[in-house]
Amino acid sequence: KAGVTQTPRYLIKTRGQQVTLSCSPISGHRSVSWYQQTPGQGLQFLFEYFSETQRNKGNFPGRFSGRQFSNSRSEMNVSTLELGDSALYLCASSPPGAGGNTIYFGEGSWLTVV
Amino acid sequence: GQNIDQPTEMTATEGAIVQINCTYQTSGFNGLFWYQQHAGEAPTFLSYNVLDGLEEKGRFSSFLSRSKGYSYLLLKELQMKDSASYLCAVTRGSTLGRLYFGRGTQLTVWP
């Protein structure tokens, strides 16, 4: 069974550009959530999607957005990039059903903004 | 917000046992996860506790006390490769797909 797959793994962007990151969850998992990890702030929740609907949202500005497709794949977009957006962006997936007892992370996308 | 506290750093020697504590104050608490994260890598799932008690999985065990808002991760027979950050995270019943993370405990295992 394939794990959570994120692309691209590494990317460099310049300030003001926008970026789109992709996440393919584990087969059968319908919940996809996104996190930003920086040395100073730790792991911070961005948003969660379930069945193509945003179910939860963290405290990030509107420049951060996401979506989920009918096959549960998800994308997140950051517009007007700032230097502080440099981080590891992690995607996690979990299966449907109550309890949420298995949440697995992908390898992450390393974004550097210069 | 959710208050999740764990020590910032711990050190131990190979072959020893170490216990990493995590306390939380979370309304609507559902369950608690432990993840291991090596530098430059993604978090790896270690355990999930929803009921009180000890869950053992090889060299790693995790304990939960819901009434005390307390958990610990116990690592036995430490190996150099166990040097990593250990993340405590909780879920709430109202937002099951969302993890609330502590800041992580950086464990260094010395030879």
Image (cartoon, coloured by chain):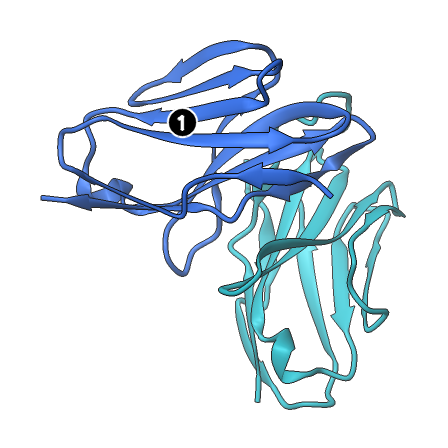
Identify the residue shown where x is 49% and y is 24%: B71
- Apparent side of residue A69 relative to residue B96 in the rendered image (left or right): right
Give how far across and how far down residue A26 sits, in percent. 63, 40
Q: What amino acid type should be assigned to the residue bearing mark 1?
A: Leu
The quarter of the rendered structure image containing the C terminus of chain A is bottom right
B24 lies above or below A35 = above
Question: How far across and down, in percent of the image, does residue A22 sit?
Answer: 69, 62
Q: Nearer the viewer, residue A30 or B111?
A: B111
Q: Which chain did the renderer colour blue? A: B
Outermost residue toward the left? B111
- SS for callout 1: strand
A16 left or right of A55 in image: left
Residue indicated by mark 1: B73
Where, by quadrant of the figure, is residue A65 drawn? bottom right
Between A8 and B103, the residue placed more toward the observer is B103
Instruction: Tell me where residue B31 sits by quadrant.
Output: top right
**Residue A32: image location, x then y, percent:** 73, 45
- Above/below status of B40 relative to B2: below
Determine the chain carrying the residue at label 1: B
Rendered shade, chain A = cyan
Q: Is residue A95 visible?
A: no
Q: Is residue B68 visible?
A: yes
Residue for point 61% across, 16% down? B66
Instruction: Place residue B33 in its image quadrant.
Output: top right
| Quadrant including the N terminus of chain A | top right
